[in-house]
Amino acid sequence: MSFACHGYGFSEYSQIMIKKDIENIWLAKELRVQFRTGGKIMEPHKVRQILIKTPEQPVEIVPNKSVRPAIFEDVKRLYRRITEEPGVNDTDDPYEFSKLLIRKIKLWKVALESCETVALKFFSAYEKEIHDGMHLINAISTKLDSFSLITAFYNHREAIFKLSDEIREISTFYLDHTDFWEDLDQSFEAINGHLTGLFQHPDILANCKILKKICNYSAKK
């Protein structure tokens, strides 16, 4: 097993060959370290599975730096504002709390990607918000060790609070009305296929133009 250790007197990426039972990997939490492989922070049990299958897989040992109590409390308050998840007040371990933040990031990313798929298929409403939201998510999740993640949430706390509201709004707009967007898209296809006939009904044609203007206005938001 090949490990690169950081912050314990070893030069960066120095390789340590560990011959002991890999069950010792479960000490990660007690030793306040995290494992990173392939550029991603991994749970100890997943690292163990990887090393059993591929012993030569390089694994970085990343020490958890201490988060200032005031910053930790501020981010906990932020998390309570953006989620209805109970038990946050009982989470005094930055390592465990960072896992809540990672889960929230993943949910946000899935929501925005789903909305983007619908937007590209139909109308591009909230295009800028979706783009900016994905950019912010990528920025705060560059490093997923507890110190880096909590610090990133603190440094971007106002933008994150805004993002949470926007994701809720965008998801309601697109994902809660998918059937409506599909019906509307089919209606426009039908209209475009019968434009000649609609010229004989100026009132209907006028209403169709108004509807298109509304959709185009939404697309520019």
Image (cartoon, helix red, strand yellow):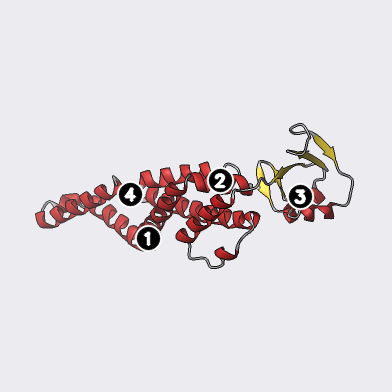
Q: Residue furthest bottom?
A: 86
Badge 3 marks a residue whose secondary structure is: helix
**Hey, what amino acid is under mark 4?**
Ala
Residue at image location 56% in from the left, 67% down from the top: 87
For disc 2, the marked residue is 151
Q: CA distance from mark 3 to mark 2?
A: 29 Å
Cβ–Cβ below 8 Å for labels 4 and 2? no
Mark nearer the N terminus (2 vs 1) = 2
The residue nearer to you, when weighing 124 against 135, is 135
Residue at image location 54% in from the left, 50% down from the top: 71
The residue nearer to you, when weighing 77 against 210, is 77
What crowding class fits label 1: few (fewer than 14 Cα within 10 Å), some (14-19), or many (20 or more)?
Answer: few
Cβ–Cβ below 8 Å for labels 2 and 1? no
On residue 21, the disc is: none
On residue 172, the disc is: 1
In which image quadrant can residue 59 be found?
Answer: top right
On the image, the x and y values in percent for residue 132 come to: 42, 43
In the rendered image, the quadrant that contains the N terminus is top right
Mark nearer the N terminus (4 vs 3) = 3
Total numbered circles = 4
For disc 4, the marked residue is 125
What crowding class fits label 4: few (fewer than 14 Cα within 10 Å), some (14-19), or many (20 or more)?
Answer: many
Mark nearer the N terminus (1 vs 4) = 4
Badge 1 marks a residue whose secondary structure is: helix
Q: CA distance from mark 4 to mark 2?
A: 32 Å
For residue 169, side relative to residue 33 (left or right) = left
Q: Nearer the viewer, mark 3 or mark 2?
A: 2
**Hey, what amino acid is under mark 3?**
Ile
For disc 3, the marked residue is 50
Can residue 144 be seen by looking at this rendering? no
Mark nearer the N terminus (4 vs 2) = 4
